[in-house]
Image (cartoon, rainbow, N blue to C red):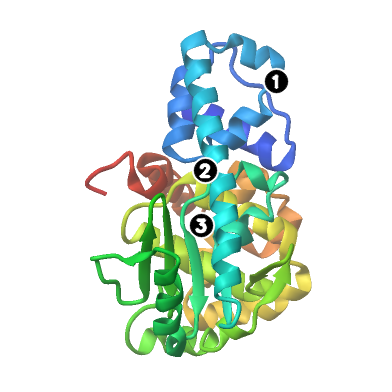
Amino acid sequence: MTDTEQSLLTLLRRALFGCELPLPTDVDWQRVFEEAVSHSVHLLVYDCLTEQERAAIPKETAALWRQEVLSAMWYNEQLLGEQQAVLKALSGLPCVILKGSSSAACYPRPELRCAGDIDLLILPADLEKAEAILSARGYRPSENNHPFHRAMLREPFIVELHFELPGIPLGASGAPLREYFQTAAGEGIFRGGLPVLPPERQAVLLLLHKLEHITSSGLGLRQLCYWAVFVHRDMTPERWEDLLPKLSRFGLLHFARVITRICVEDLALPPEDAPWCMTADEGLCRALLEDILRTGNFGCKEERY
């Protein structure tokens, strides 16, 4: 792990859990900024910098960083407004938000999560109705077909209408997961006025999403941060007791242990939030973290991931 990567992890510990650890005296702020942008965590990191640290950033780097922060926060605001309008338009159809705002709600400051697309889970039977509703709002279908969702585009927004969760394996190995989420679109709960999955189902979704990234474009620190704050806020001992046997049945328990132990050791997730994870293999945790640091968000640092 490089000094820059270590500094970035130290700052993320501070941003997510208020863990105050010293930074090296010779921090290369330009490289920390670039690394934070590559993992889409530059809002989180910039917000937690002290006055002395901001004063130490070279002027050109500070100007670029502020520009990226303002741009990301502007897009966040625009996306949230569009999401509300889309949900209102689809109000007659059962649906829940996947990731996105439901993940942001777990952050100490939700507005510091860099937004992406609007991901919704709907019932398969409602796909054509949902497409028609979005088409009336000026959206057009993407030319690229996906086996589990339909992407609708209206610059600068993308709405992904999922009729099956991303990351569920094909065939018999995915059958238990497919059954678990079969009616999930109609069984959401409301949090902050938004329809979201209950915590146990959200946990499975986030794990599947991470595995999908690892086997496709690459997993970055942004996705690791999601998991850490979600576990801390939403997963009680009673929920783990109910969920862990399901994760074993789904084939996700080993991965859950590894990814959660990384969050404990490298992002300051309190170990008492998930004591069951500490049996994960330490060498595998180190190897996966190195892979996460190497690839960046959506694999942007490693073109041939």
Q: Is residue 298 above or below residue 49?
A: below
Q: Secondary structure at mark 3?
A: loop
Q: Residue flagged by tag 2: what amino acid is it?
A: Tyr
Q: Is residue 176 above or below residue 280?
A: below
Q: Nearer the viewer's eye, disc 3 or disc 1? A: 1
| CA–CA distance in space, label 3 to label 1 | 36 Å
Q: Is residue 222 above or below residue 189?
A: above
| CA–CA distance in space, label 1 to label 2 | 25 Å
* Mark toward the start of the polypeptide (3 vs 1): 1
| CA–CA distance in space, label 3 to label 2 | 39 Å
* Mark toward the start of the polypeptide (1 vs 2): 1
Residue carrying label 1: 50
Q: Position of residue 195 (x, y in %)?
A: 65, 71
Residue carrying label 3: 281
Q: Position of residue 2 (x, y in %)?
A: 44, 27
Q: Quadrant of residue 154?
A: bottom left
Q: Secondary structure at mark 2?
A: helix
**Label ID, residue 75:** 2
